[in-house]
Amino acid sequence: MDFKSLYCFAELIRLQSFSATASALNLTQPTVSKIIQALEEELGVPLLCKENGRKKRQVQPTAIGEEVYRHALNLLHERDLLLARIDDYRHVKSGTLRLGLALFGSDLLSHALFDFHHKWPDIELSFLEQGSLAIEQSLRNNELDAGQLLAPVHEDFDSITLCDYPLVVLMPKNRARHDALTLKSLQHEPFILFGAGFSLNETIQTACRNQGFTPNVVCRTGQWNLVADMVAHNMGIALLPEYYARKINPDVFAAIPLVDPEIRWQLTMAWKKHQRPTPALRAWLDVVREAFGRRNKSNQIIRPSEKKGVVITRFQTTAFPVKNGKTA
C-alpha cells in the first residue's frame, strides 16, 4: 500500500466518479479501476459496494471502505505536513530571525541562541530588547517573529513556557526577621519596581491593590543587578523572581518566600497564532522546544553553566554547588 493508491481512492470517494477521478489524476479510467482493485486485494477487504450483486462497482464505500477513507485522509494530511517541514528545512539557509528579548529573562535563552546559530549560521539574529508589553505590541505590528511574554499570554498568541518561578522578597540580610512574608506585611515598605513596559510591574501592583494598599515606589529600573544594589543600600525592598535571587550573594541578601499571595514569574516564547511561521521561525521554535522540554520536578530550569546557586525554601536560604544540572 502506497500513498498514490490511497490518494487515488480518496479522490474517487471525493469525486464520486471513476471518469472524473481519472481526469483529475491524469490517468485512464481502466488504470483507476486497476489501482482500486489492487488496493482491495492488498488489504483483503472490499472498499466499494457492488450494484445489486453484479460485478459493476458503485462509487459508494463499504463500511470498512469508509474507515479506510478516513484514515487515508489523515495519512495524506500527515504526509503533506511532513513534506512541508522538509521543504522548510531545505530552505532555512539565510534570512533574518527577529526576536523580542525581555530585559528580565533574556539570559534564559543564551544556550538556545548558541544552538540555533550553530545549526543555522547564515541566519541573522535581530533582537528588540524591551519589556514584555512593548514586545507584545511589536508582535502585533509584525515587527517581530517571536518574543518573550509574561504568562498568561493573550489568546492571539501561541507560546512555549520557558520558566516558572515564584517571586521572593529581597532585602538586606541584616534586616531579615521572618522565614516567610505576606504581601500585606510589606505595605509600609518602600518598593523598588521595574521600568515602564514590564508586565511584572502590573502583576505586582495589582496584587498590592488586592491586598488593600498601593505600594510606595521609590525607584524603577529594568536592571535586576541595579535592583539588588539599591536593596543592599537600604533604598527599599524588591520582589524579584527566584531565578535572579539565586544569582546574588547570600551573605549580603535575604530572599524571603512570599506566601500570601504567591506571585509567579512565568516567562514564555510567544508568536502570533493565526500567521504561518517562516522557515526560520519554525527552526527557532524547534530549538526552543528541545532546550526547554526537560524540566526537573519543581518545574524550574537549572542550566549546566551555573556553577553556584541559592536554593530558596519556605524557611531558609542556603548556598549549594551545582554540577551538570544536579545538586552536588
Image (cartoon, rainbow, N blue to C red):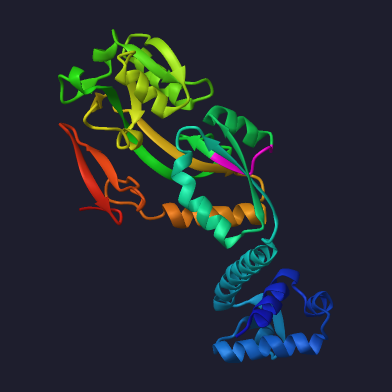
Q: Give the residue at x 57% y 34%.
A: 129
Q: Main secondary structure of the magenta part?
A: loop
Q: Position of residue 141 (x, y in %)?
A: 68, 34
Q: Is 100 situated above or below 326?
A: above
Instruction: Tell whether position 273 is magenta.
Output: no
Left or right: residue 28 compared with residue 293 = right
Image quadrant where one finds the N terminus: bottom right
Question: Dividing the picture into quarters, in which one does residue 176 lie?
Answer: top left
Task: Answer whether residue 166 is visible to the viewer in this image.
Answer: yes
Q: Position of residue 85 (x, y in %)?
A: 63, 64
Depth order, front residue of 21/286: 286
Q: Give the residue at x 72% y 90%.
A: 34
Q: Position of residue 20 (x, y in %)?
A: 82, 75
Question: Dividing the picture into quarters, in which one does residue 204 lie?
Answer: top left
Numbered marks: total:
0
Instruction: Tell whether position 144 is magenta.
Output: yes
Task: Answer whether residue 277 is visible to the viewer in this image.
Answer: no
Q: Position of residue 253 (x, y in %)?
A: 25, 26
Depth order, front residue of 41/277: 277
Depth order, front residue of 157/242: 242
Depth order, front residue of 180/317: 317
Left or right: residue 206 compared with residue 14 = left
Q: Give the residue at x 48% y 47%.
A: 110
Q: Is 128 situated above or below 300?
A: above
Magenta-tinted stretch? 142-147
